[in-house]
Amino acid sequence: PTLAYFAPARIWLRPPRLPLLLLRISQRSLSVPRPVCIRKMSSGASKETSQETSVVASSKTLSPHSHGSTDIATATTAGSVTNLDAASKRKNNNRSNNNKNKRNNNKKPRRSSPSASDKSKYSARSQGYGPASSQFAASGEVGDVPHPGSHASALYAGGEASSSSKEKEERSPHPKRKLAFLLSFCGKSYGGMQMNVGVRTIQAEVERAFFETGMLSLSNYGYPRKYGWSNSARTDKGVHAAAQVCSAKVLVPTPGEDLDELRVRVNERLPSDICLLDVKKVTKSFQAKTARDKVRYQYMVPSYLLRPREEVRKVFEDVLAGKKGSFEQVVGDEEATKVMDDFRSYRAPADVLQKVDSVFKKYEGTKKYHNYTNSKSYTDASAARYMMSFVRAGVVEGDDGMEWVAVAVTGQAFLLHQIRKMVSMAVDVVRGAATEEQMDRSFGDGVVKLSIAPSQGLFLDMSYFDLYCARSTFAHEKLEWGENGSEATKRWEEFKREKIVKHILEEESKEKNFLQYIYNQEFHFYSPNCYKFYEGQKNGGNGSSGKGEDEEEEED
């Protein structure tokens, strides 16, 4: 019977069942070794063994009458087994070497303790000396050195923290939990929300308070990615937020995991212009940036920006008496005081407020905002944004008698400078410097040059997590603030009224940012071609950057 069966890419020695039974009986009687069943062979060994297997198949080892053939078959079979073992060993060795090389290539470099020069270099950067280096990744961490924008870099510079001290650190007995934090802050004294080299940031101050409270271990202090830090919105230099939501996996050192007591302890270590309003447990996979469904921003507009253009221009001309030039050249303290005294007495009438409602409502829905940001064209799909609402949120009067109109915009996400340019365009339509047709064309396939409103009136008002709240179970609290009348909501309203809005009103009486904006609009921006529509051009988003930085989000 045939003992060799050849299949594509495989060689099997598989005798039929009945001859195999006879073969085993004959081998037992003659003490002949059993033929080897070769399941799989490498391509290199197939040629060597094919001839030997044919010899085994053709030899008369099964016949008890063939004298002397037993030794021949045994030798042939043993030789084939030896060759097969050598080939399989070579293949296994090559495979193990390849796997070892892959593991070595994918292995991350071992962290090394920073030298004295490295410590001084990173410490200098953290204190604002020297430029930031391109070697820092997005997380800002290099080797065993913490983020250069973190206060933890000072521990390395002073020798208080090192790799050995981290190894000796005892494991905390407190449980680790994924928590969501509702933060409010006045960003006047800070260089933004995210950690950055050489500037004071909100995240660095919050991280230090967490560390001093016992929520972060020494090995995690200065490494935001280790404890999964995430924030719901991006805020830049000088920008305020009434409801910034952040998430992190931290230790809970309070008895019974009392989150309200944890909030009080953290606030004791935070500056007065930063306040932790609420702390809630969330799921392990929660990320504040990706879980946020929508966000609401608020902008404070001085009522005199809504005044008819002719009246505003006449006030400047009467006070300046024919002087021309930039705002710094022609508007001194005396002239600014006279102009502001006239503007403080203005109150927006009902018909103007109704026009504010109708004009800002034009932004609702999905439109192309390539002209309301930088470096985007109407062909870019990411320029299309969905605005859920843009409404008037009330009227506020400052201590100096100035009237302000608050407007609130709610959307899924915003582009850089988008809200400030939306406010500038709508204000010009209300005061008669632009038409509603020009506003409608700004969403079309072309380019319109738009101005940008000051950043001082803009702040993040509320973040929403509707989809997360709909999926959350009884074990996790819903992330709802602003309308439920809770203690956290009351703290949010108080901080927004006493810290953020009050600061915006007082800042304008001192710095006169909006006065400079309206002067530049009247005497420098407005021209016969200021709102001209260039159809078909793709380089949208041009316009002056204005004073200060804005807090709107970059495209995700």
Image (cartoon, helix red, strand yellow):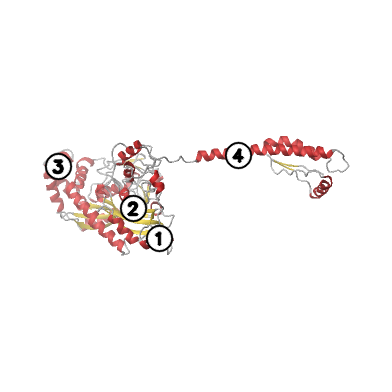
Tell me the quarter of the picture where residue 41 sits: top right
In terms of sequence position, does the residue under pointer 4 or pointer 3 come before the other?
Answer: 4
Q: Which mark is residue 469?
A: 1
Is residue 434 visible in the rendered image? The answer is no
In terms of sequence position, does the residue under pointer 2 or pointer 3 come before the other?
Answer: 2
Q: Nearer the viewer, mark 2 or mark 1?
A: 2
Q: Residues within 10 Å of mark 3 (few under 14, many from 20)?
A: many
**To which residue does mark 2 refer?**
210
Q: Residue furthest right?
A: 65
In terms of sequence position, does the residue under pointer 2 or pointer 1 come before the other?
Answer: 2
Q: Nearer the viewer, mark 3 or mark 1?
A: 1
CA–CA distance between discs 4 and 3?
80 Å
Tell me which residue sits at (73%, 37%) in the image: 49
Residue type at mark 2 is Phe
- For label 1, the SS is helix
The residue nearer to you, when weighing 291 against 147, is 147
Residue type at mark 3 is Val
**To which residue does mark 4 refer?**
95
Q: Nearer the viewer, mark 4 or mark 3?
A: 4
- For label 2, the SS is helix
CA–CA distance between discs 2 and 1?
26 Å
Quarter placement of the N terminus: top right
In terms of sequence position, does the residue under pointer 3 or pointer 1 come before the other?
Answer: 3
The residue nearer to you, when weighing 512 against 276, is 276
- In the displayed structure, would residue 256 be above or below residue 318? below
